[in-house]
């Protein structure tokens, strides 16, 4: 009889510890929303979703969609970042860290709802990415509004001034004419846009028109009440890009990455450089190996800076406990956070690494 009571007491004690552990696990760590830049309305929209008990995926979709509607910084959603032809196109991504499913659209024309189109790819196809006019056709067939002209008076005006300035600056290299609007043809010879010095660093002959207001992405991460993690991104790409260019925005592991077992990352900056290094995959894997978010983020940025010391970019990293940090190179970076215990969104400023 005594043995039976002892067993019963042990069982009760085990369940008590399990309950206590669950309570500790969820006390104040999440829900949580983190986003690149001071996109306050977008973070508030995502927070409202996740704080109500809905999923992390729903939260990042709502947050990025809000930024698209607000045309954050002119670099998200319709009406901004014209390409060489004066047209605005959309790149977007959503990733579910619980299932590792990804949906993305790239160089999408005529449909303004980039993040919702990416969600449709993830949830209604077996694919990961759709591109160009076919992505537009798919999104419209699934109920999104379109076809819509994504240009605006502002974007066409910006494009017109660029044309008047002989299409400078641009993303062409090793072509003729050097200071004109084309048509372009290869210059020939052994010319190259870059040279490796003895240290292995790449010295870029690259236009310095990568900045917050012409080359940016909203990258957002959310952790819901169940502890599930998701990320989402949306951008209209680099201003005056060559038509057809796709940056890091829709590339899983570059602009964003999420894994419930570890945490998440979001990135922004010169996507043409950053996508070669998959900084968000690197940051998350760094955390998997035991690095704190600050160290993980700095390492991911340092790997790029060692080879491309003139690049401009930033990441934030957040682990599954809700600890967050940022790192940047070539500019001062800000990211926004809303979590339990905060009255509103808080903006954190990160200075560039030396």
Image (cartoon, rainbow, N blue to C red):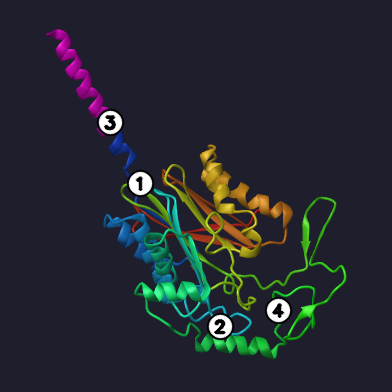
> Which of the two discs, 3 and 2, labels the residue nearer the N terminus?
3
Q: CA distance from mark 2 to mark 1?
A: 40 Å
Residue 43 visible in image: no
Query: Please, what secondary structure does the residue beneath circle 4 have?
Result: loop
| Residue pointed to by mark 4 | 169
Of all residues shown, which one is farthest toward the right? 189
Residues at badges 1 and 3 in contact (C-beta under 8 Å)? no
Dots 2 and 1: beta carbons under 8 Å? Answer: no
Label 1, residues with CA under 10 Å away: few <14, some 14-19, many ≥20: many
Q: Which residue is mark 2?
A: 87
Q: Residue furthest top?
A: 2
Q: Mark 4, residues whose alpha carbon is within 10 Å: few (<14), some, or many (≥20)? A: some
Q: Which mark is residue 227?
A: 1
The picture quadrant where one finds residue 21 is: top left
Q: Which residue is mark 3?
A: 18
Secondary structure at badge 3 equals: helix
Q: Which mark is residue 317?
A: none
Q: Earlier in the sequence, mark 3 or mark 4?
A: 3
Answer with mark 2 or mark 4, whichever residue precedes in sequence: 2
- Would residue 31 appear left or right of 243 to someone viewing this image? left
Residue 85 in the image: state x and y as whole percent: 61, 84
Q: Position of residue 353 (x, y in %)?
A: 65, 53
As drawn, is 119 to the left or to the right of 308? Answer: left
Mark 1 lies on a secondary structure that is loop
Could you tell me residue 115's position as x and y percent? 43, 67
């Amino acid at each position: 009889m005594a043995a039976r009571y002892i067993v019963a007491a042990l069982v009760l004690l085990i369940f008590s510890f399990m309950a206590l552990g669950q309570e500790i696990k969820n006390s104040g760590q999440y829900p949580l929303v983190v986003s690149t830049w001071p996109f306050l309305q977008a973070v508030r929209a995502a927070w409202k979703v996740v704080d109500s008990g809905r999923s992390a995926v729903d939260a990042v979709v709502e947050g990025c969609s809000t930024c698209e509607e607000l045309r954050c910084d002119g670099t998200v959603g319709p009406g901004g970042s014209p390409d060489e032809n004066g047209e605005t196109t959309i790149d977007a991504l959503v990733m579910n860290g619980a299932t590792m499913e990804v949906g993305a659209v790239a160089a999408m024309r005529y449909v303004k709802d980039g993040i919702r189109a990416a969600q449709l790819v993830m949830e209604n196809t077996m694919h990961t990415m759709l591109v160009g006019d076919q992505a537009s056709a798919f999104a419209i067939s699934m109920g999104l509004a379109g076809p819509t002209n994504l240009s605006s008076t502002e974007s066409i005006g910006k494009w017109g001034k660029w044309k008047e300035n002989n299409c400078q600056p641009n993303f062409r290299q090793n072509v003729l004419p050097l200071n004109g609007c084309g048509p372009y043809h290869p210059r020939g010879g052994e010319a190259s846009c870059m040279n490796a010095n003895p240290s292995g660093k790449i010295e870029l002959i690259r236009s310095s028109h990568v900045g917050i207001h012409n080359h940016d992405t909203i990258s957002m991460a959310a952790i819901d009440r169940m502890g599930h993690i998701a990320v989402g991104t949306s951008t209209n790409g680099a201003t005056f890009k060559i038509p057809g260019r796709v940056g890091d925005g829709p590339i899983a592991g570059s602009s964003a990455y999420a894994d419930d077992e570890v945490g998440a990352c979001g990135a922004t900056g010169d996507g043409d450089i950053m996508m070669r290094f998959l900084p968000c995959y690197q940051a998350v894997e760094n955390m998997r190996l035991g690095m704190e978010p600050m160290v993980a983020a700095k390492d991911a940025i340092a790997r790029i800076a060692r080879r491309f010391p003139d690049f401009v970019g930033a990441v934030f990293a957040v682990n599954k406990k809700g600890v967050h940090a940022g790192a940047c190179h070539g500019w001062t970076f800000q990211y926004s956070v809303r979590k339990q215990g905060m009255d509103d969104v808080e903006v954190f400023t990160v200075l560039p690494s030396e």
